[in-house]
Image (cartoon, rainbow, N blue to C red):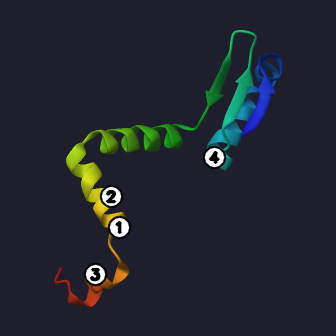
Amino acid sequence: MYNTNVTQARANLYKLIDMTIEDGEMININTKKGNAVIISEADYNALIETLYLSSNPDIKKSIIDGINTSIDECIDEGQVEW
């Protein structure tokens, strides 16, 4: 995460936005009142999707079950009819 203060962020706004879009860099902007973070729209959408999926108990259980399933228990791609 790239850290900067609000004065420097104001002076380099376009550069910071390019860093988030092109490199996926998160920008932490420090102010006297607190901090703010700039992230790319793609990263924001991914976070929102993750929160949505995590909020649905059935989907969350399915994801956790999938993570805990060993490779040996998975179906070989050659066995699946498309």
Q: Position of residue 25 (x, y in %)?
A: 68, 43
Q: Is residue 9 left or right of residue 51?
A: right
Specify the amino acid type for callout 1.
Answer: Asn
In the rendered image, which quarter is residue 30 located in?
top right
Disc 3 to disc 2, how far (Cα)? 15 Å
Of discs 1 and 4, which sits in the foreground?
A: 1
Pointers 2 and 1 in contact (C-beta within 8 Å): yes
Mark nearer the N terminus (4 vs 2): 4
What residue is shown with label 1?
Answer: 68
Pointers 1 and 4 in contact (C-beta within 8 Å): no
Disc 3 to disc 1, how far (Cα)? 10 Å
Pointers 3 and 1 in contact (C-beta within 8 Å): no
Relative to 82, does residue 15 appear above or below in the rendering? above
Specify the amino acid type for callout 2.
Answer: Ile
Disc 2 to disc 1, how far (Cα)? 6 Å
**How would you rate the neighbour count of disc 3 (Cα within 10 Å): few for under 14, some for 14-19, many for 20 or more?**
few
What residue is shown with label 3?
Answer: 73
What residue is shown with label 4?
Answer: 24
Task: Say which element carries label 2.
Answer: helix
* Residue 32 numbered tag: none
**How would you rate the neighbour count of disc 4 (Cα within 10 Å): few for under 14, some for 14-19, many for 20 or more?**
some
Q: Is residue 66 left or right of residue 13?
A: left
In this view, the residue in front, 15 or 71, is 71
Q: Quadrant of the N terminus?
A: top right
Mark nearer the N terminus (3 vs 2): 2
Mark nearer the N terminus (3 vs 4): 4
